[in-house]
Amino acid sequence: MAVMAPYETIFFSMSSNRRNGRGVKKQMRKITMLSLLLFAAITGKAFAYDVQLKPFQDVGPTDWFYDNVYSLAALGMINGESAAIFHPDGLLSREAFVKLIVAASREETQQSSASSLPDVPADRWSYPYIAYAAERHWINFMLDASGQFHPAQPITREEVAALIGKMLLESLDEPSRSQWLQSGWIGEKEANPFKDSRPIAEAIAPYVYYAVHQGILEGDERGFRPGDLLPRKEAAAIIYRCVDLAATGQALDVTGFYAIRSYPAIGRISSLSNVIFGWSHLQYDKAGQASLQTEATEYRIPDGWEQAVEAAKAANIHSELMVYSGGASLRDFVKDKAAQAAFIDSLLQTLDDPQYPFTGVCIDFEGLKEEAGAADYVAFLSALKAKLGHRSLTVAVPPVYYYKGYDLKKIGDIADTVILMAYDFTDQGGKLPSAPLPLVNDTVRQALVAIPKEKLVLGISKQANQWITSQGGTSYYEPEIDAVERRLAAQPEGQSWSLPYHLKQITFQDERGSHLIYYEDAESIAKKLWLAQYYGLKGVSIWHMGNATASDWDAIHAAAK
């Protein structure tokens, strides 16, 4: 592929990220605080999301449990005693910990049978979690002689370890589990001779030592402290290790969008599971007429395209053609059956062209906000799928908080793969960045209600959001990635890891004012990969390949199949 002339890189005045992080060059957007507030009011894009988007006042960067707490908060697994207070030294009850461990197992508690525990009635808040754990015999050792669980009683470290050991051993095959319970645990006990005045109870020792063996719990200079009660901060660390253990080793498909300015990443194509070429767009000018266009706009087949095609062929990977549409006319197109038929015919002509490697198509139609159009869009996708034959259909969908024209359940039924564009949450007035991890997680959880995890791909957009505040107000920008990287290299001070967003934060002052930048760097990408692994998603996609840095690719490859 011939190198396309790069855009001029001016840190504060040019942008290569279109709405949804997609990369259309546009002029600097300068917005005063007043107009920001009006923007939020007019577009209806200001939302009170039900996730933790503010930091806890009592959990700071110097706390050893800092990342554990915010990672679990991002997953929606823990919360504070209020929106601002986590209370890390508060003790955890048995029922609260059971809820955490069941949540970490990612199972549906609604499928559990009724619990017969006399002190856990069906109307108790913790009932479904305790019933689930009881059904699997995780908590049988915690019952007293009368069969009561005592849910509100503070839980001990010994009970925590045994409960986790039972849960983890359940995932082993029968021979491995039996071997551990009979003799394997003894080797772990000999390797970890904890110095405690009270030993671990023999009946549960095999389970306790399995949790130790897996690195979930450990002792200190005082020993294992089996009878110590569990504070919330230790619970966060323990549950995080369980989640991390479940996520680690879950390999992901990696889909790269080879689109604008992606030639520097052409050598990365061979490391992908799939490549999607962003080389076409929907042309819809009037009723009854539409076609696939591969010229004229940024979404076109570029000069020298043959090199990218050959790279995909040499790698023998799945290759799709992306069709983009984001104009106001899209609402009319999804109602225009004649235009859709003409477009599908035009698309098939390109897909049938033997010079291209396309094994399928990725439909990226954005901006459908009205729920009334959802059925029309589904009908179009269904008609397209029927014509594709053996070719694959991938559909990119936005978060459904404010885009109601996407019926995720029906789209998931039709498509082979659904790419969830879990970004574009930017609130310019509130200085909310594009892809805070709590909102990414909430978007994934919403999608999983409708779409099987085996079909769902988490979309990651490499971008930055910048605000400059001066006496004249606040201006918003989307700076070039290479410019952000240059600043990171030249000026390391003012850089931090922003929680609960889980993004790189950059702050500095200059003659223009006070600057705040949130940036999707390798560390934040790794956290999103971790989230995709935890949920067992099919994979992740990267928009776009040309923006990803060497460090980003290292993180991506570590999680790839």
Image: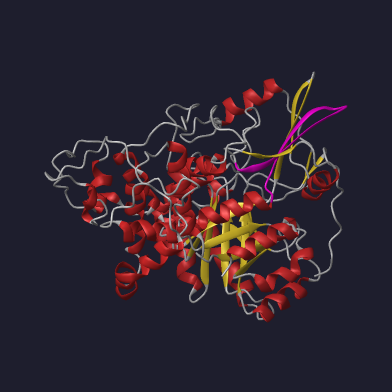
Q: 357 or 387: which is nearer to us?
A: 357
Task: Using the rendered image of the protein, determine whether residue 279 is visible from the camera's viewpoint.
Answer: no
Give the x, y percent position of residue 483: 82, 46
- Quadrant of image for the C terminus: bottom right
Residue lying at 55% horizontally and 32% vertically, measured from the top left: 59
> Does any portion of residue 182 appear in the rendered image?
yes
The part of the image, by quadrant, that contains residue 281 is: bottom right
Q: Is residue 401 above or below residue 431?
A: below
Outermost residue toward the left?
Answer: 146
394 sits left or right of 141 in the view:
right
- Total marks shown come to 0
* Furthest residue toward front: 197
Against 36, residue 174 (above or below) is below
Residue 169 image offset from top left, x and y in percent: 34, 63
Q: Classify 408 as above or below 314.
A: above
Place of residue 497 in the rendered image (x, y in percent of width and height, measured from the top left): 66, 41
Q: Is residue 277 left or right of residue 97?
A: right
Membership of 520 in magenta stretch:
yes
- Could you tell whether 400 is left or right of 516 in the image? left
Of residues 125 and 62, the one nearer the viewer is 62
In the image, the segment drawn in magenta is: 502-521
The answer to if 204 sits in the magenta stretch is no
Residue farthest top in this picture: 471
Q: Nearer the viewer, residue 137 or 270?
A: 137
